[in-house]
Image (cartoon, rainbow, N blue to C red):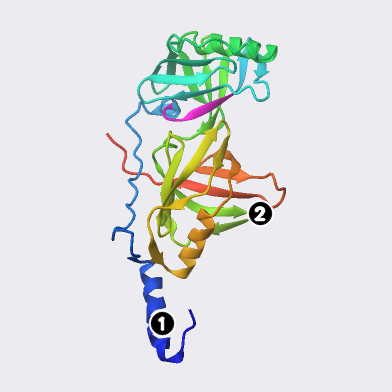
């Protein structure tokens, strides 16, 4: 809209108001309600120690060591395990999915009998069957000592014979249901911080939906996790508020994306990175918004 001299003062005041308040009044049709603020994630009470770090996360199996011999997981074997706070674990040995009880203490893990009733996939290659058999024998063979291998995202499960399963975190605690603040976008070798800070966050849900806030408005969409990858789909506003021009521009860029598959990396937060375009790679860096731990 062109601004004439007679309206210059009014226009300047309007811009200043939008900038100071960040988010202004809802547009018509929004129902007069601002997007709900996220509830910070609080970890359920656990046993502490390295055993406690296993809970609520999903782990990839990198290799097993039997009688001092290390056997790497075959490429694309897909062996993983997820430990629940309800004393259960689910996963896949590579050819066969499983579900069992799991008793976790600060230093040990004991896995019960498989209750899934699943049978091995006959199409699995011989190497994957062999790896599965070795992993299953260690994993279900009695109490396992839980130890940090390198850091808190790489662990070992070791039996009394010294055989062990090496784990690497795939998905962190609180991936589902927790608000994840988008700290910055990764564009090639640069990072771009979000102007709205904690007002930009995603909440991933187990049913494949994603909700959140783009800095000004709430949104919804889809996010499909599979192994070490996640595919994000276009996001749609569910509220219609007006904010400063910069925040609205960043929100537009965030929501208007093409379906894209990213590698998932874990550490102090989670990072989604697409490196398929060489040096022009793109990604997101998230940090979990946490609450006060329960006691």
User: Could you tell me which residue is drawn at 46 percent across and 64 percent down?
Assistant: 247
Q: Are marks 2 and 1 in contact (CB under 8 Å)?
A: no
Observer-nearest of 52 and 261: 261
The answer to which quarter of the image holds residue 174 is top left
* Circle 2 SS class: loop
Is 142 magenta? The answer is no
**Above or below 109: residue 271:** below
Q: Is residue 67 left or right of residue 180?
A: right
Q: Residue at x 49, y 15 (%)?
A: 98
* Image quadrant where residue 156 sits: top right
Residue 232 shows in this picture:
yes
Q: Is residue 60 magenta?
A: yes
Q: Position of residue 196 (x, y in %)?
A: 44, 60
The numbered mark, 2 or 1, whose residue comes first in the sequence reads 1
The boundaries of the magenta stretch are: 55-61
Q: Which residue corresponds to mark 2?
A: 188
Image label count: 2
Q: Nearer the viewer, residue 106 or 76?
A: 76
């Amino acid at each position: 809209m062109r601004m004439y001299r007679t309206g210059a003062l009014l226009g300047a005041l309007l811009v200043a108001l939008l900038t100071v308040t960040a988010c202004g009044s809802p547009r018509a049709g929004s129902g007069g309600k601002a997007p709900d603020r996220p509830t910070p994630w609080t970890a359920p009470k656990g046993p502490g120690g390295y055993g406690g770090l296993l809970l609520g996360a999903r782990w990839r199996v990198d290799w097993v060591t039997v009688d001092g011999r290390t056997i790497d997981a075959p490429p694309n074997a897909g062996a993983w395990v997820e430990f629940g706070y309800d004393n259960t674990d689910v996963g896949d040995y590579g050819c066969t999915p499983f579900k069992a009880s799991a008793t976790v203490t600060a230093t040990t893990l004991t896995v019960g009998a498989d209750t899934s009733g699943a049978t091995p996939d006959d199409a699995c290659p011989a190497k994957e069957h062999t790896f599965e058999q070795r992993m299953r024998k260690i994993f279900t063979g009695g109490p396992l000592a839980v130890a940090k291998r390198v850091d808190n995202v790489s662990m070992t499960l070791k039996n009394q014979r010294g055989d062990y399963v090496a784990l690497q975190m795939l998905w962190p605690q609180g991936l589902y249901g927790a608000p994840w603040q988008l700290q910055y976008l990764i564009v090639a070798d640069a990072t771009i911080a979000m102007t709205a800070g904690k007002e930009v966050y995603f909440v991933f849900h187990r049913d494949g939906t994603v909700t959140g806030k783009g800095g000004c408005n709430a949104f919804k969409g889809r996010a499909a996790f599979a192994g070490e990858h996640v595919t994000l789909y276009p996001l749609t506003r569910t509220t219609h508020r007006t904010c400063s021009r910069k925040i609205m521009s960043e929100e537009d860029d965030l929501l208007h994306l093409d379906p894209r598959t990213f590698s998932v990396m874990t550490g102090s937060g989670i990072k989604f990175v697409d490196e398929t375009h060489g040096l022009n790679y793109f990604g997101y860096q998230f940090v979990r918004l946490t609450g006060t731990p329960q006691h």
